[in-house]
Image: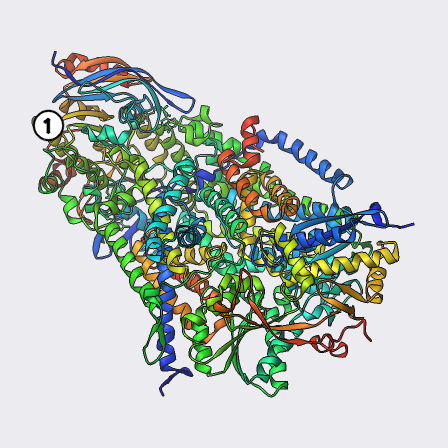
Amino acid sequence: MAARSEPAAIAAPLATANGLRHQYLVMAGMALALASAPLLLYPVFLMKVLCFALFACAFNLLIGYVGLVSFGHAAFFGTAAYAAGHAAKVWGFPPELAVAFATLCSAALGLVFGWLAIRRQGIYFAMITLALAQMLYFFYLQAPFTGGEDGIQAIPRGRLLGVLDLSNDLVMYWVVLAVFLGGFLLIYRTIHSPFGQVLKAIRENEPRAVSLGYEVDRYKLLAFVLSAALSGLAGGTKALVFQLASLTDVHWTMSGEVVLMALVGGLGTVFGPIVGAAVIVSLQNYLAGLGHWVTIVQGLIFVACVLAFRRGIVGELGRLLGKPL
Amino acid sequence: MTELLGIPAPVLFGQLLLGLINGAFYAILSLGLAVIFGLLNIINFTHGAQYMMGAFTAWMLLNWAGLGYWWALLLAPLFVGLTGILIERFLLKRLAGLDHLYGLLLTFGLALVIQGLYRNEFGSTGLPYAIPAELRGGQNLGFMFLPNYRAWVVVVSLAVCLATWLVIEKTRLGSYLRAATENPTLVQAMGIDVPRMVTLTYGFGVALAAFAGVLAAPIYQVSPLMGADLIIVVFAVVVIGGMGSILGSILTGFGLGVIEGLTKVFWPEASSTVIFVIMAIVLLLRPAGLFGRTG
Amino acid sequence: RADFTGGKVRIGVLNDQSSLYADITGQGSVVAARMAVEDFGGKVKGAPIEVVFADHQNKPDVGSNIARQWYDTEGVDVIVDVPTSSVALAINEVTREKNKVFLVSGAATSDLTGAKCSPNTVHWTYDTWALANGTGSAIVQTGGDSWFFLTADYAFGHALERDTAAVVTKNGGKVLGSVRHPLNNPDFSSYLLQAQASKAKIIGLANAGGDTINSIKQAAEFGIVAGGQNLAGLLVFITDVHGLGLPIAQGLILTESFYWDLNENTRAFAKRFGERMNGRVPTMVQAGVYASILHYLKALEALGSDGDGKAVVDKMKAIPTDDPLFGKGEIRKDGRKLHPMYLFEVKKPAESKGPWDYYKLKATIPADKAFRPLAEGGCPLVQ
Amino acid sequence: MAGDGTILETQGLTKEFRGFVAVRDVALRVRRGSVHALIGPNGAGKTTCFNLLTKFLQPTAGRIFFEGRDITGLRPAEVAKLGIVRSFQISAVFGHLTALENVRIALQRQRGESFDFWRSEKLLERWNGRARELLDAVGIGAFADVPAAELPYGRKRALELATTIALEPRLMLLDEPTAGMGREDVGRITALIREVAKGRTVLMVEHNLSVVADLCDTITVLVRGEILAEGDYARIAADPRVREAYIGSEEGRA
Amino acid sequence: MSTALLEVEDLHAWYGEAHVLHGMRFSVREGEVVTLLGRNGAGKTTTLKAILGIGPRRTGSVRFRGQELVHLPPHRIARLGIAWCPEERGIFASLNVLENLLLPPVVAEGGLSLEAIFELFPNLRERLSSQGTKLSGGEQQMLAIARILRTGARLLLLDEPTEGLAPVIVQQIGRTIEKLKRAGFTILLVEQNFRFAARVADRHYIVEHGRVVDEIASVELGPGQERLVAYLAV
Ligand SMILES: Nc1ncnc2c1ncn2[C@@H]1O[C@H](COP(=O)(O)OP(=O)(O)OP(=O)(O)O)[C@@H](O)[C@H]1O
Ligand SMILES: Nc1ncnc2c1ncn2[C@@H]1O[C@H](COP(=O)(O)OP(=O)(O)OP(=O)(O)O)[C@@H](O)[C@H]1O
Ligand SMILES: [Mg+2]
Ligand SMILES: [Mg+2]
C-alpha cells in the first residue's frame, strides 16, 4: 500500500478517554481567563479573537480529526457573514435569528461542497474546496446584495432576544463568549463521541473501516457539514460584532489564514486553534503599527514557527508536558 | 466578415493567439511549481516572489551593472536559482517528511518577507523595463498586430518547456525524480545522492520562475507584488494538469491561457474565475487531474 | 483652557503601507502628517500633538477594527488619509458612530460627500467626479469625442466609468462600449484588442494602480497609440507615471489637484519632503494629508477642544481654508473641500529637465467647476 | 440457483484492468460452514477476487450471490453489513487506537451507524466487556490498552481477527492471514482460525500449504484468473497441473 | 580464514530514544550466503538498514572490503556495491514495471541482463508497462528482487524475499540464490522461513534483542536444528 504519510504527519496524539482530566482543567482555566479578559484587554479585539478561534476550531475538526484539509473554508465563514448581515440589516432580523440563519446557510453550503468534494483526498480535496470557494467569491463579487467590495456596512447589532442591547461592547462580548464556548464544547464533545471514534478509525485506515461496514463518506460528510456550520456560526457572529461583511471574509486569503491559525496553534490539538487564532489576530492588530514592516515581520514569524515549533505552539507545549492538549 | 457568436472571426483569432502567449507564462511557472512539488512535496508559495525576483534582477542588472535583457535572461535565473538553493539547503531541508502544509507555511512566510523587502527598497508601484531594441515593433498579421516581443515569448517558452520535458521524461533523471518523491530513502540506498538532487531540482524550479520573471519584465510592470496573486492561479494550473505531471502542467498552462483569453471576450468579468471553474469540473470528473496518475 | 481628550491631540494616519497604494499614501503620508504638525508648532494651545499610523491592508474589516481600537482605547481623535474606497466608507461609519473626525485624502469615491456623507467627515483632495469631469470634459473638448472604457470590475471602477461617461455625453461625445476586467489583472492585451476593434478615439482607463500601469504599458506594446487611438487615465498619480517611465507615459492626459512643481510653495514643500523620503516627491494624496491636518489643527485652536468630532468639523467648515499647497478654499456643507483641479499632460522624455519633472499644465479647472455641485450629490446633510 | 448448502456463489465473475484480465469467468461456490481456501501462484487473481466479492472493485462481468441474494450491485459497506467481512493482505488495524478501541469500533457498528456526535463516548464503555472477551479469545487480552501500532506483527493480525469476529460475520474472507509471521505465530493463528471457524464460513487465501492442508475442507486453485482445479488437499496436491503451476517439487509440507 | 567481505562489529542503533541494536557482531565472507534468523522484532531489518546507513542512528563499525562505512552517506555505500531488497518491497507507484526495473543505477559489471531476469521471473515480462504497485503482492516481491540483480552489486541484502510467494516461486528463488552464489555474489539474507534458509545458506546467525546470540553452520544443521528450533519457538 503506497501509504503516503499524509494524515500520519498531522496525526494528533489521540487521547484516550481516561487521559483527559487535565484538559478539563485547562478548559476551566480558559473559560475563567476569557471571562476576566475584558478587564485588561479591549473587548472588540477579544471578540475578534473569539470569532476566529471558533472558526479555527471548526476547521481543525476537519483537518485534525478527519485528515481533510479544506482550502475553501472562507466560503462558509463569509457566506454566514453576508447572510447574517443581510438578515439583520435588510430583513431586520433580531441578532439571534440572524446568526442562526447564517449558520444554517453555511451548513447547507457545507452539504453541497461536501457532497462534491468528499470523495477526493489530500491535496485534491484541498483544491476542489478552493475552486468551489473561488467560484462563490466570484458570485459574491457580482451579486448585488453583497455591496461588491464595499461589503455590507453598518450592520445593526440589535437587541438579543429583544432585551440585551448589543451595541454595548461589553454586553456583546459576553454573548460572543457564550457562543464561542458553546461551539467549542460542541466540537470537544464531537471529538469524544461515538461518532468521533469512528472518524478516528476512518482517518487511521479507511479501507478497513469500510470493510467493517461503515459508510465512510457519510461520516466525512457529516463532519464536513458540522465544520461548515460552526464556521458559519463564527462568521455570522463576526459580522454582527464588526457590523461589516465584506469580500475579505470570502477571499482565499481568509481560507489561508485559518489554516495558518490551526498550524501555528497545533494541528489536531484541542486548544491549538484557539492559541493560533489569538496569535494571528494579535499579530495583525499589534503589528499594524509597524507600517510597512508588517508583512516582513509576519513572514519571519511564520518561518520561525515552522522551523521551531512544528507541532504548533500547543502541540509543542503538550509534548513538553507529556500530555495531549 | 464571418462572425462567431457575435465576435468577428479575426478578432477571435487574435484572442486565441493572445491566450497562447499568456499560457506561455502559466506553462513556465507551473512547470517550475510542478517540478518542485513533484520532488520536494512542497507547494512552493515563494514561486510568485521568485518570479518577481527574476524581473527585478533583470532591472538591477540593467540599471546597476549596465547589463541588458539578453544577459538578464541568462544571469537572473542563475542568481535567483542560487538563492533558491540556499533556501532549500538551510530551510526546506528541515521539513523533510512533514505534511505539505508546513512547507506551504514556510514558503508563504518567505514570500511575505521577500516581497516586503523588495517593496521597502523599490516602492510598491514598480519600475519600468523596456523591451529590448531587437524585439521592438511588431507584425501586422491582418487580423491583429502581433508585437515581436510576444511572439518571442511564445517561442522561447515553448522551447524551454519542451527541453525540460525531454530531460525529465525521457532520461533516467525523470525516473529518479519520481521515485525519490515516493521513497527518498530507498532511492538513496540505490546509490543516488538524493539530497543533492533535491537541492538542485529546487534551484532549477526557482530558476524557471526567475526566467519567466525576466520574460515578463518588459510587458508587465516590474513590481514587488507582480507574483503575489499569480501563484494561486498557477497552482490551479498544476492541479488541473495533474500534480507531478510535467507534460500536464505544460499543456494545461497553454490550454488555460487560451481558455482564459476566450473568456475575456465572452464574459470578461469571469476571466479570473474561469480557471477555478475548470479546476472544479476536472477534479470532479478526473480526480487526479487531466494527466495525473491515479495512485 | 483647552480641553483635549487625554491632554493631547492624537492624529492617526491609516492607509496602505504595504501593498498597491503604499507609494501613493503609505509612509509618505505619515511624513506629510508629521510635517504638518511641525509646521503648526508641535502643540495646540499647549497640548502636544502626536502622529500614529497603521496599515489597513486595503481590507475594510482590518481598517474599521483599527479605527475602533484607536478611537476607543488609544485616544486618537482624528483619522486621516485612508485610501481604498471600501475601507474609507467603513471608517466613515465608525467615525460617525464614535463622533470623531475623519479627514479623507486617499480615497476617491464621491459617495463620501454624496449618499454616504457624514457630519464628521471632510473629503479633501479629489474624488471620482472631479477626475471624470477634469479629464473627460477636457478631452472631449479637444476632439476626443468617441470613447471606449477599460473598467476595473468593482464599484469604484464602475463609478469612475459612469461619471466619466456622463461627462463625455454631456459634452457631446459618444461612448462606443466598455469592457470590465477583474481587479489586479496582469494582462490587458485581450481587452486592448477589443478596445482597438471598437475604433474609439479615446480609450478611457477606469481603473487604478497596477491595472492602469499595465494597460498603458501594454497599449504601447500593441501600438495602440501609434495607431491613432489615445489613452485617458482617469486615476493616474505621479508615482504611476514614474513607474511607467516617460517613454511610455508621454502624452497621457490626467487630472490631479496637486503637483509638486506648481509654484514656490509646492516646490519648497516638495524639497523638504524629498529630504525625508529618499528624494521622492509628494503625491497629491500626501499633500492633502498635510493640508487637511493643518486646517484641522487650526480648527482645534479656534475651538479649544477635540472631544466632539462634529463640532470640530463644523468649525473646519466655518473657517476658510488657506494652506501653502492648495491655496485658498473652503469646505462645503457636505464635507467636500473645494480647490482647483489641474489638467496635466505627461512630458516627452526630451522635455523633462530632471527627476520627477513629468507634467505640463494644460488647464486649470476653477474650484467652483472642479467638483460636483452640492445639489447633485444627494447628501442628506444638505437637505 | 444454489441449494441450501451454498452460502456464496459467483457466476462468470470477470475483472479486466485496461485490457488485462485478472479474473476470468470464475464460478466459485462456497459451502456453508466450510473452510475454503483459494490458492494459486502470485498474480493469479486471488486478492482481486476478494476485492470483487467485498465490492472494493466492481466486476467487469458476472454476478455474485450471497445466501441466494444477488449482491453484485451493493456498496462495500452494505456487503459488510450483510455479514461478509474481510481482512487485508497487509495487516489493517487502527494504529493510534488501543486494541480495545479497535474491537469496539466493530462492536459499535452493530448498534447501527453511529452518527451521534453530541453524545459522550462513555456510551461505548458498555462494549468493553465483550471487547475484552474477544481480545482474550485471540490471546491478546493483556494488550488491551496498548495502541495497535505498537503491537508486534503477529499480534496485529490477531487483533484484526478479533475485530473481524466482533462483527459476527457469516462469511469471513481472510487474505494471507499468516504472511510475514514467525513460526510460533503461525501456529497460534491457525489454531485461532480453526476456533472461530466453528459455526461460520471462512474463505481464505494462503500460500503456506501446511496451513491450508491443516485447516481447509475445500481448495480452489486459481491460475491466471481462471479456476484450474478444486477439491480437498490430497486431491489438489496430487494434481500434476497444480504441482506444475503452484506447488512445485517441494514435497509434503503438511 | 579468508578475509571477510563484510564485517560488523559492536553495531548499535537507535530509533529516536529506542535502543534497538545492542552490539551486533558478525561477518560475511566473499561468496557466502549467510542468514540472520530471529523472531519478529529481533532487529534483523534494523541491522540491514544500519549497514546501509538509512533509518536509525548508529555507532560501531561496519567494514566492507576493509573500508569503514559508518561515516559514509547511503548513496556512497550503495555505490561500493551493496544492494538492498527491503522487506516492504519498495515498488514505486509512479513508475511502471520496466522503469522500476531499470531504476537502480548499475554500479559494477556482472549484473544480470534483462533477458536473464525475465527468464527467472516470467510474470514480469507480461506486465512491463503496468504501474508498479498494481502488481500482485508476490509479483511486487519478484520485481524488488529482480531490480537489484541488474546492478552488479556484489553484496546483496535480502530482507524476507520469500514472503507471500507461491511455493514454486520460492523454489525458484532458492535456485536463483544458488546460481548467484555460484556466480560469486555474496548474500546476507533475513528470513522467517527457516526451511528455505536452511537449504540455501552456508551459515546462520541467530539474532535476539539486537545481538547475535549464536552461530550455526548449515552442515551441522542436523544436530543444530534442535538449537535453532529452540531459539525460534516460544
Ligand atoms: N488495480 C489494478 N490495475 C491493474 N492491474 C491489477 C490491479 N490489481 C491487480 N492487478 C493485476 O491483476 C493480477 C492479479 O492480482 P492479485 O492481487 O489478485 O493477485 P493475487 O492472486 O492476490 O497474488 P499474490 O498471491 O501475489 O497476492 C496481477 O497480475 C496484478 O498485477
Ligand atoms: N521506524 C521505527 N521506529 C521505532 N522503532 C522501530 C522502527 N522500526 C523498527 N522498530 C523497532 O525496532 C525493533 C527491531 O525491529 P526490526 O524491524 O529490525 O525487527 P525484525 O527482526 O526485522 O522483525 P520482523 O521479522 O518482524 O521483520 C522492533 O522492536 C521494532 O518495534
Ligand atoms: Mg494477493
Ligand atoms: Mg524485518
Q: How far across and down, in percent of the image, does residue C39 sit?
A: 75, 53
Q: Quadrant of the C terminus of chain A?
A: top right
Residue D181, image quadrant: top left
Tell me the subunit letter for badge 1.
E
Of D65 and B92, nearer the camera is B92
| Quadrant location, the N terminus of chain A | top left
Which residue is nearer to you in this view: D54 or E52? E52
Q: Looking at the picture, which amino acid does disc 1 mark? A: Glu
In the image, taking residue A144 as reference, residue A312 lies left or right, namely left
What residue is at 18 percent from the left and 29 percent from the top? E81
Q: Nearer the viewer, residue A15 or B26?
A: B26
Q: Quadrant of residue C315?
A: bottom right
User: The residue tagged with tag 1: helix, strand or loop?
Assistant: helix
Residue E233 in sight from this viewpoint = yes
Q: Nearer the viewer, residue E46 or D24?
A: E46
Name the residue carrying label 1.
E178
